[in-house]
Image: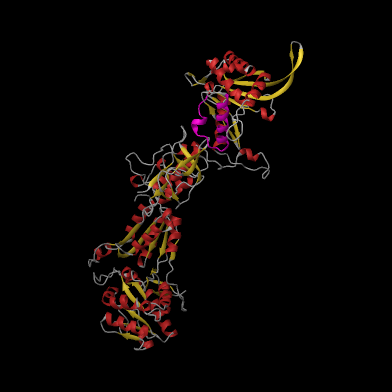
Amino acid sequence: MRELTYAQAIQEALAQAMDADPSVFLMGEDIGVYGGAFQVTGDLVHRYGEDRVMDAPISELGQAGVAVGAALAGCKPVLEFQFSDFATLAMEQIVNQAAKLRFMLGGKVNVPLVMRFPAGSGTGAAAQHSQSLDAWLAHVPGLKVIQPSTPADVKGMLLAAIDDPDPVMVFEHKLLYKMKGEVPEEPYRIAIGKAHVAREGRDVTVVATSIMVHKSLEAAQILAAEDIDVEVIDLRTLRPIDTATIIESVKKTSRLACVYEGVKTLGIGSEISARIAESEAFDYLDAPILRLGGVESPIPYNPELEKAAVPQVPGIVEALRNLVRGRM
Amino acid sequence: MAVEVILPRVDMDMATGKISKWHHKDGDKVAKGAALFEIETDKAAMEIDAPADGILRNIVVTEGGTAAVGSAVAWIYAEGEAVTAAAPAAAAQVTNAATPTAAATAAPVASTTTLNGEAPRATPLARRLARQAGLSIAAITGSGPRGRITAADVRSTEEAKPAAAPAPAATPDPVQKLYAPGSFEVIPVDGMRRTIAARLTESKQTVPHFYLSVTCTLTTLMATRERLNAAAPKGADGQPLWKLSINDFIIKAMALALQKVPNANVTWAGDSILQHKSSDVGVAVAVEGGLFTPVIRNAEGKTLTTISTEMKELAAKARARKLVPSEYQGGTTAISNLGMYGIEQFTAIINPPQATILAVGAAVDRFIPVKGQPVLASQMNCTLSCDHRAVDGAVGAEFLQAFGQLIEEPLLMLA
């Protein structure tokens, strides 16, 4: 099968969605002639015109408001934020409008919009352009929040998000944009709300999100040499969470670690830990539940400190080894 | 504050107890002093009363389950009180294993706490596995951080267990292999059957038995019994106040014979012999699935009618499996009477620590020579089994002779 980068897979999904449905349009800062801050939209403006690939002024709140209004009026807007950090500017529209209107209007309207958020650290973009705010939005009922980790997933999940009648927040890790992977050419959907067992194992369940899926898989490879068999679950969707898949896995492995880039405290791993502690899988736990998340600090600019601020492969290896060997 | 329902010690050497029946279910309102559950001990079913008024919650030892003496088996909450989960340490004590003895030997540490008084640290999986394996979490050494018990610790303890106490039903019984599959029904052994098997095997293998027989003529006894029964005044219900049986006379005769031959009123106590002052006579009572031997105490001082009434009560309680240990423990001798089945003569196995047991046969009419002439008489064969460690042949013979005289001339019971 032919390979695409993660960014190309997104672009293909957007193009196929616009081909299939004239109500789909794109909006964002510099997504037109410039092709987007991370070159995701590329030449789409030349293929679909400025009416469907719209450059927007630098006002995230304004863009979000337009998107909500367009969605209410029957369009399917896909809004690109230049950095996910700027979601903070649009919170009123995202949290108070997009997420709530369907409920407040008795289900008579839907808000079928998609917002794409380039997220995460590792690019030297410092504290205001490197955050992982996925858990912030996953806290809000009414939103769906996805974090595809591979080119194939991002295409299928983005198409599912555009189809979805509710607002879907897509968090794309910036370091994944250049990652290559096999992607089917035809349009396809990957269900929102379904986790994926990326690697089967018997000794410990790792629930990871986004780029941490790849770091966890790398750690699993290293630990396999020590006869530690790691199961890696790619959570894919933060809201709604696929708890059943995790429960099944923990019942098999008896150990759970959550690996995520967002700040550890009150992060997605905290929620998963709590769900497992509350579930039937509790009686199967043979070790404390472990969370590996971002440090309690803004992401530093210094490249070494930036790396140290989020889980990295050697740290994941050591933590999982201690967990499985009964040292914690 | 919830009140713990504790599994009490109802029998002297009891380490664990099996709950045979709950009279109430979770959520039921219970009254202090009302029967709450039944414990099956080696010998009897004991009813345990509710320790408080309230709502029964968190039954951690279900029917058929076994728990260590002193452990909490449920909680009673005040009405409206918030129910918390069962205390894990107590729950961990619970075993639903088929055999209480296995649980007892596997759990030498009867306490639910560690030396420093803290509850043992164990992972949820370890606790669950221990529960399933019938192991007490307190008996497992933890290898994890701060002594935490993990699943691996439970598994290694469980693997070590068969050496100490073979798990029942782990392998098909070799006896079963001797018979065609499906040609038999497997009847599980209950506490009473297990006790009978263990005690009588021990007795027959370790107690040196010898046997003495005597034939007693019952002519006088029969006549005396008839006159006494005929003379019984009527009670308020119009029924005679007593109806003495031959067995009542036998009990009384045994008691008086033991007083006459105190050397036979003994028990072997290892490095000493206990010579007893009163005559406490056990009487075997057959019940569904086994037998009990309730004891008539101080029988030497009791009238025949008292013995008769007491015996009827004890037999009824035995059949209902409601005897309490104080009603069947101790005793120096016992009577096993199979006369009603037409058995003329047999020998009985001594019930330790008693020193003798009398096997009583049926009363049989025979012609016996009296002054050279055949005279029809009712006769009964009695065989005394003696523990030779405590009772020598001559002592046993003296005792049996004294017994025979009392049977043949019941008036001596008044002397």
Residue displayed at 32% across by 86% down:
A54
Q: For residue B349, say whether it is visible.
A: no
Which residue is at the front of the view, B280 or A46? B280
Image vertical order of residue B395 relative to residue B117, above or below: above
Looking at the image, what colour scheme do you see?
A: secondary structure
Q: Quadrant of residue A305?
A: bottom left
Image vertical order of residue B349 relative to residue B60, above or below: above
Q: Give the image location of residue B156, x and y in percent.
A: 45, 43
Image vertical order of residue A32 relative to residue B219, above or below: below
Q: For residue B74, say whether it is visible.
A: yes
Q: Which stretch appears magenta?
A: B304-331
Magenta stretch: dominant SS? helix
Q: Give the image location of residue A85, x and y in percent.
A: 27, 73
Q: Quadrant of residue B288?
A: top right
Image vertical order of residue B179 relative to residue B267, above or below: below
Residue displayed at 48% across by 21% down:
B270
Question: In the figure, is residue B311 to the left or right of A154?
Answer: right
Question: In the figure, is residue A18 to the left or right of B299?
Answer: left
In this view, the residue farthest toward the top is B371
Which residue is at the front of the view, B51 or B202? B51
Q: Give the image location of residue A185, x and y in percent.
A: 46, 78
Q: Quadrant of residue A272?
A: bottom left
In this view, the residue farthest toward the right is B373
Magenta highlight on residue B307: yes
Question: In the figure, is residue B188 to the left or right of A152?
Answer: right
Magenta highlight on residue B311: yes
Q: Give the image location of residue A71, x and y in percent.
A: 37, 83
**Number of marks in the image?**
0
Which residue is at the front of the view, B399 or A104? B399
